[in-house]
Image (spheres, rainbow, N blue to C red):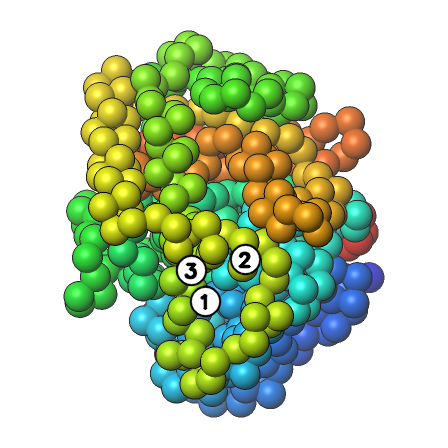
Amino acid sequence: MMDAFAWLDATAQAALVRKREVTPLELLDAAVARIERLNPQLNAVVTPMFDQARRAASVPLPDGPFTGVPFLLKDLTAAYAGVPMTSGSLAMKDFVPLADSELVARHKRAGFVIAGKTNTPEFGLLPTTEPALFGPARNPWALDRTTGGSSGGSAAAVASGMVPAAHGNDGGGSIRIPASCCGLFGFKPSRGRNPLAIDPSGLQVEHALTRSVRDSAAILDATQGAQRGDPFHAPPPARPYVEELCAGPGKLRIAFTSRALGATTLHEDCVAAVRDAAKLCADLGHNVEEAAPALLVELISNALNLIWRAGAAAQIDAVPLLAGRVPAEGEFEPLTRALAQQGRGYSAPELFLAMGMLQIAAQSMSAFYQQYDIWLTPTLGSPPVPLGTFDSTPDDPASGFAPAEAFVPFTALINATGQPAMSVPLYWNAEGLPIGAHFVAPFGDEPTLFRLAAQLEEARPWADRRPPVSA
């Protein structure tokens, strides 16, 4: 049986610590017991940090909003001094950062007790978490299905009750995809809202996966604000995001889309989920109609593909600088090598033009929001797919990338435009698998999303749902 803390969100756990009803060490020991019990099935936590966490929990912690609450870091971009950061790659298995990244430093200042690192695909390149280095993370709702990616280990850990929240990042949907697959709230902030990992394209943003809306808002309050030297900055919020949750969203103009903008065909369950979310919003008093922005989808997709492939090549080239050695070719997965090879075929002008296309996409989306406050789409093109769906064939190592793109027909577009977006767990299909609804707001307008999310959470609560692995 799960312990008394397992399904409390981070806000509730922190309140117990403040009232001295529980100690940080007691919360940590309970979380460690859950990880040790569940992780053999889920493979969510790949680098336990229990000793470091116990040392941290045994001394006075920073006085923050989450003092004493156990937390996990995704094993990609989240550098913790003295702990390996593999990025899901055999080539990086011995890389140990010498200093904390800025985001991790802010997590610590918020009072989180960091208990481990979570599973991620190699360099975060796929929307599933099945790295050769660690093996697949498994979905708590169905062990043969993907957790999504690339923050799949974090999603499995939170959904199963190991911890109430975990770090994630999102360069093409990597917070929202696993949130949809695992029945969580997954919020992608605006470009430049949080401290940035090195990413000149501006596609990637950092945040967390949570079970409650209030946790996501409070974590963003604790971490938001670009660090000095970041190339992108989002406008500062007028007030803390947690204060938005009681404000009410008013009557929003919501456009919903129930078909893919490109050639992809959406699974009927995903169409049903977005139509159900649209009806719920209408029932709550919002103006809802079917519409979509006029985007040059093919050109944007081509630009994203070029940037991702060039990025794969850059990741491989960065390994000797970080790990201090030249890795063997076999230390990279075939898909990574194939994408990198394609990326090396592009010229600097082509990469420059691709980044310019992202700016055009952002401008086109801005025009759409003159008429609407929110765009609602399915998060994914299908429910969580079986593990192995995106495996490449030996004769075509890059072949797994095309079905992966079809799986995520909407999320990457929003990384291109830099807008805030969230996947909300409002729907489960006949198989008992969660399917997220994807809400997108104008750049810098996280408050509207949080206000709407709080309304949806109250109207259709999801916190009491438990995956079979945790029953």
Neighbour tally class for label 2: few under 14, some 14-19, many 20 plus, Cα within 10 Å = many
Q: Is residue 243 visible?
A: no
Under mark 2, the amino acid is Thr
Q: Nearer the viewer, residue 290 or 254?
A: 290
Whether the residues at callouts 3 and 2 have beta carbons within 8 Å, the answer is: no
Identify whether 435 is placed above or below 350. above
Q: Position of residue 72 (x, y in %)?
A: 54, 67
Q: What distance separates the C-alpha of mark 2 from that of mark 1?
A: 9 Å
Under mark 1, the amino acid is Ile
Q: Position of residue 147 (x, y in %)?
A: 65, 49
Q: Which mark is residue 336?
A: 2
Identify whether 350 is placed above or below 227. above
Whether the residues at callouts 1 and 3 have beta carbons within 8 Å, the answer is: yes
Residue at the (27%, 20%) spot, across then down: 368
SS at badge 2: helix
Q: Is residue 405 left or right of residue 143?
A: left
The residue carrying mark 3 is 313
Whether the residues at callouts 2 and 1 have beta carbons within 8 Å, the answer is: yes
The residue carrying mark 1 is 316
Picture quadrant where residue 138 is located:
bottom right
Mark 2 or mark 1: whose residue is earlier in sequence: 1
Q: Position of residue 57 (x, y in %)?
A: 52, 83
Identify whether 288 is placed above or below 333. above
Under mark 3, the amino acid is Ala
Q: What distance separates the C-alpha of mark 1 from that of mark 3?
A: 5 Å
Q: What distance separates the C-alpha of mark 3 from that of mark 2?
A: 8 Å
Residue at the (36%, 83%) spot, across then down: 99
